[in-house]
Image (cartoon, helix red, strand yellow):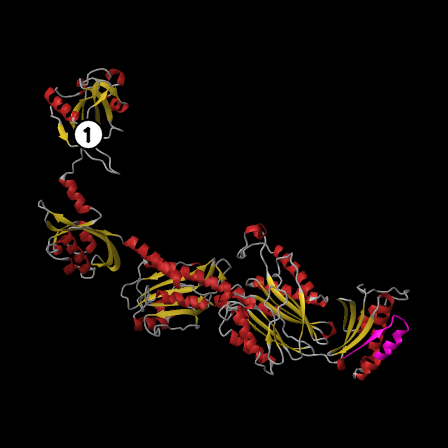
Amino acid sequence: MDAPREEPDAPTSAGHRAPFDASSDAAAVVSAHGVVLAWTRAAEELLGHPAAEIVGGPAAPLLAMPGDPKRVAGIAERCRVGMGWSGLIPLRHREGRRIDADLRVSASFRLGTDECFLISARERRPQWSVGQSILDGFLTRAPVGMAVMDTQLRYVWLNDTLERFGGVPREQRLGRRLSELLPGLQTETIEGLMRKVMDTGVPVTDYEYSGWSWADPHRRHAYSTSFFPLVDQDDSITGVCYMVLDVTERWNARQLLALVNEAGTRIGTTLDVLRTAQELADFAVPRFADFVVVDLLEPVLSTEGHGAWLTDAGPAPARPVMRRAGLSSVREGAPEAVARIGDRVDFVPPPHDVHLIVDGEPILIPVLDPSDEQWVTEQPARVASMREFGLHSLISVPMRARNTALGLTTFLRSLNPVPFQPDDVPVARELVARAALCVDNARRYTREHTAAVTLQRSLLPQALTGGTALEVASSYLPADPTGGVGGDWFDVIPLSGARVGLVVGDVVGHGITAAATMGRLRTAVQTLADMEMPPDELLAHLDDLVLRLSEEHPYGEGAQMPEGADGAGSAHHSTTAFLGATCLYAVYDPVTRRCTMARAGHPPPVVVAPDGQVSFPEPPAGPPLGLGGMAFEACEIELAENSLFGLYTDGLIEAAEGDMERGMARLGDLLSRRAPDLGALCSSAVRQLVPVPQPDDIALLLTRTHALGAEHVVSWDVPVDPAAVADVRARATRQVADWGLGELAMTTELIVSELVTNAIRYAEPPIRLRLLRDSRLTCEVADASSTAPRLRHARSMDEGGRGLFLVAQLSHRWGARYTADGKIIWAEQETG
C-alpha cells in the first residue's frame, strides 16, 4: 500500500483555483477521536455513502490502506498548531473500488467541547503522457514552422513545415544561417531579434513581416514569427527556437482594409467627375500598378439626360463610346498611353466587348502576350506600347454604381516584375467600387447642379428697366459648384405713377428646391406689387406664402432639418421643411424723390449721395420670411437726384472674411468711387469684393435715381360738380397737346372724362386730377374714398356702367392704389 505523500499548502491567486477548494470538493468534519460529525453532498458523490450511513460512525473504514496511528498522531499535532496538512490518500468507495484522492486536513477547531478537523478531498485523475512518436509527429508535421538555432544562429533542427515555407531543403539549411539562405526575407532584422533574445533571455512574440521565398517566388507572403531562448540545466542559454506561421491571408486582408481606408480619404474629394477619375489613377500608382487608365462612358460626362447606361436598360452598343478621364504612370509623361485625357476611346481587353462594362466581372491577365492574334488585330497600338514599355500584366475592372454602368478602369504593371495574381483582383475591385460611387455621386450632382442653374437663370429677370425714374444695373455671381445653387433673386418692377419697385431676396438652402422657391417668391412679389401693396403689407403676404410653401413641402428624400429645429418647434419641423427667406422691398417715387421700404431679415440698402457720402439706412429689420406671426414695418427716406441706391444679398458682404460690417464698409467705399457707367461700377464692386468663388450666390442691384421735374407733372383740383368735368377735360387735352402728344388727345379726353365723372358721382372729396409724362402718359384721379372700383359689363339697355370698361379698352393698363388719404385710380397710355 502506498504511503501518503505530503504536499505543502498551495496558495491561491486571482484567476487561479487552489488544488484544494472546500467550496466544491468532498468535505467532512471528523472529531479528534476519528468520528464523522458532518458529511457533505460532494462527499456522498465521491464515495457513494449517504450521510445517514456515515455521520456518527468511524472514519477509518473509508481509508483503503492499513491504519498508522503514529502518522495520524503526527498529522493531528501539525494541525493543532495551525499549519494544516495535505497529501495523496487512497480512499474506498461504497462499492469497494479504490479512489486516489488529494486530501487536505485543516487546522483544528472546536465544536462545543469536541476538537474537530475539516477534511476535504478531490479525486486525482491520471495525467496523460506523450509518447516520443506522438511528440515527433507533432514537431515535424505541425502547421507551424519551427527551427532551433545555435548560439551562432546556425540551423540545428527544423521541421517539415518550415522547410516548405522557405523552399530550401533541410540538408542545405543545417549548419547555415538564415541570411545565407534567404537574403530577401528581412534576414538582418530577424537575426537581430534572435541575438536580442539570447542577450536578454526575453522572448519576442508575433513579429510580422513580408517577403518572397523560393517555395513561391512570384507571390509575396506574410509571416508571424515568435522567438524564445533555449536554456540548459544551469540556466545558461544554448540557442534560440523560433516558430513561423504563414499569415498571408490575414496580412492581405489588413493591407486591403488599410488601402481602401486610405483610398476613401484620397478619392472623391470633390464633386467633379474628371477630378475623381484622376484621383483614382493617381492613388493606384505606384501603390498597386505602374500604369492606370480610367475611361468613362460619354453619357457620364454629359450633363444632359440620365447621364449613363442603366445595366437593365436594354441592349448596349457593340463598342463602348468612352472618353479618357484619368491617366497616371510611374514614367514621367505616361509615354505608354495611346490616348490622352479627353480623347475618345473604346478599349476593352480582347476578346471581351461592351458587355464587360455592362454586366461583366473583373478581367485578370497575369501575363500579357503581345503576339496574341486577337490583341494584334484589335489593339495594334496597344500591342506596340506593350512591347516598347514592357507592359506584362493587366487587370480591368468595370465601373458600376447603383445599377449604372460608368466605364472601365485598367491597371497594368511594367517596371514591377511581379505579375498580378488572383489575390490582387479584390484590391482592384474595391478601389474601383469606391471610385465608382464617387463618380456616380459627382455625375448626379453635376446634372442636378446644371438643372438648378438653368432653372435659376430662367427665373431671374432677363432685362431690367427703371424707366425714367431709375438707371439700373445688376451683377449676379453664382455659387462655387461645390456650394450648390442658391436662391438669391432681385427684380425691378414698374409701378403706376412712374414709380418703381425694387426687390432683393435670398432663400435659405441650396439646390433645385431653393431655386424653385425663389421663382415662386419672385412671381408672388410681382403679383403683389401689381396690386399696389405698400412694402410692409407686401412682406406680410409674402410671409404667409412662405408658411404655406413650408406646409406643402414635407420632409422626403434629400430634405434636411434646419439647424436649431428642436425644442418647442420640433413637433412642427418633424413633418414640414423650413423654407425660410430674407427679403427687402422698396418703392421709389421720382416725383417726390421719396423711397419707402421694408425688410424681412435682410441687410439694409446702401445709399451714396451725389457728394459721395455713404450711408446704410436701416428700416426696422423684421423677421425672416417663414416664421409667421410677426409684423413688418416700413420707413421712408428722401433721395437726392443722382443718388446711388443699392440692394444686395449677404454673400456679397460676408465674402470679406465673414465680417458683415467690414464687408458693408468696403462695399460703400467701392461705390463711392463714382463712375459714369453704372454697369461697370456694379461689376467692378462685385469682382473686388469677391475675387474667388464663394459657397453662396451673390447679387448686387444698383440704381441711380432721377427726379420727374415739374415740366413732366401737372395737377388740378376738381370741384364736386358734374359741370366741372368739361373744364378739367379741356385742360388735360391742352396739356397733352403742349407735350407734343396730340395723337393721344382724344383718348386722354375720354379717359379723364370717365375717371373724373366716376369720382364726382361715387367718391368723396377732395378730388384731384394729375397727368404725368415719362415713358408713358399717366392719368391719375385721387379721392378720399376707400371704395374699390369695379369693372362691370353693362347690359344693352343700361344707361351707365360702361366707364371703367371704356377706360380699360382705351388704356395700356389701368388700376387703383390706396393712400393714407383714400385711393388713386390711374390709367396709362403708350407714348411711342
Up-down: is 561 above or below 776?
above
Q: Is residue 221 visible?
A: yes
Task: Give the residue displayed 32% in from the left and 72% down from the top.
Answer: 331
Amino acid type of disc 1?
A: Arg
Note whether 399 is above or below 237 in the view shown: below
Image coordinates of residue 705 in percent, x first then y, are 66, 77
Question: Is residue 728 on the magenta stretch?
Answer: yes
SS at circle 1: loop
Query: Looking at the image, which is closer to me, 188 or 470?
Result: 470
Find residue 374 and report its horizontal and vertical position in percent.
36, 67
Q: Quadrant of residue 334?
A: bottom left
Up/down of 779 relative to 431, above or below: below
> Residue 51 vs residue 480: left or right?
left
Residue 614 sits in quarter: bottom right
**Left or right of 34 on screen, residue 824:** right
Residue at 62%, 62% in the rendered image? 622
> Quick check: can you spot residue 243?
no
Q: Label 1 neighbourhood size at 10 Å, few (<14), some (14-19), many (20+)?
A: some
Position of 357 compared to 236: left or right? right
Q: Residue furthest left?
A: 234
Residue behind mark 1: 124
The answer to which image quadrant residue 671 occupies is bottom right
Q: Report the number of numbered marks.
A: 1
| Left-right relation of 729 to 581 | right
- For the point 45% across and 63% down, the residue is 439
Residue range corresponding to the magenta coloring: 713-731
Where the N terminus falls, by quadrant? Answer: top left
The stretch drawn in magenta includes residue 136 = no
